[in-house]
Image (spheres, grey):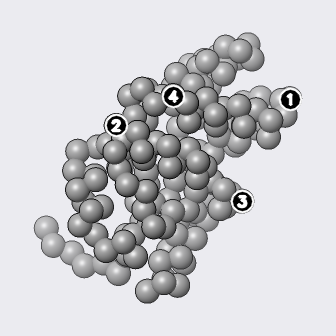
């Protein structure tokens, strides 16, 4: 299939890499420490900013403080973080100024996970640090599109 595009936005997890084992381990551990249902918490954590998960599942906790703990746990847990087949090769063949990664991870976490997966950090990324509202809000993807539009 051949198609043309002005630019491409990639989600990170589930598109370029898989961090499911790490995500689930970290969130289950965090849930147990706080007396919460680990399965429920792990199910809530995928594809959204961690601070939003904490606010949703444990509103009584200091979300900012807990978010720092969870983020460090996620950065430290690299076991099972892998590139999806062909992801690194695809990105290597794209012009660096024509694609961006849009992720719910913070920049430090995204950089760590990309490194664990063997995917070079791209020139352009929109991370949890760059938006007020994470996915499923369109804000992250709209910011990514605006970023690439501004540079083309």
Q: Is residue 86 visible?
A: yes
Q: Secondary structure at mark 2?
A: strand
Q: Nearer the viewer, residue 44 or 122?
A: 122
Mark closer to the chain start, 2 or 1: 1
Cβ atoms at labels 3 and 1 below 8 Å apart: no
Neighbourhood count class around disc 2 (C-alpha, 10 Å): few under 14, some 14–19, many 20 upward = many
What's the distance in space between the residues labelled 1 and 4, CA to CA? 26 Å
Whole-percent x, y for residue 46 in the image = 53, 37
Query: For residue 34, which quarter of the picture?
Result: top right
> Looking at the image, which residue is at 58% across and 48% down?
108
Q: Nearer the viewer, residue 27 or 125?
A: 125
What's the distance in space between the residues labelled 2 and 3, CA to CA? 28 Å
Q: Which residue is mark 1?
A: 60
Q: Which residue is mark 3?
A: 132
What's the distance in space between the residues labelled 4 and 2, CA to CA? 12 Å
Q: Which residue is mark 2?
A: 82
């Amino acid at each position: 299939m051949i198609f043309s595009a002005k630019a491409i936005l990639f989600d990170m997890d589930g598109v370029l890499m898989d961090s499911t084992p790490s995500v689930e381990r970290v969130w289950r551990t965090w849930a147990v420490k706080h007396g919460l249902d680990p399965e429920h918490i792990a199910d809530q954590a995928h594809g959204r900013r961690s601070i939003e998960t904490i606010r949703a599942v444990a509103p009584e906790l200091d979300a900012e403080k807990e978010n720092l703990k969870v983020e460090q746990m996620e950065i430290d847990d690299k076991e099972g973080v892998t590139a999806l087949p062909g992801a690194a090769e695809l990105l290597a063949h794209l012009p660096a100024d024509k694609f961006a990664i849009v992720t719910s991870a913070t920049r430090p976490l995204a950089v760590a996970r990309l490194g664990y997966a063997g995917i070079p950090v791209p020139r352009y990324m929109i991370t949890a640090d760059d938006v007020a509202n994470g996915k499923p809000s369109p804000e992250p993807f709209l910011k990514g599109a605006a970023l690439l539009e501004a540079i083309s």
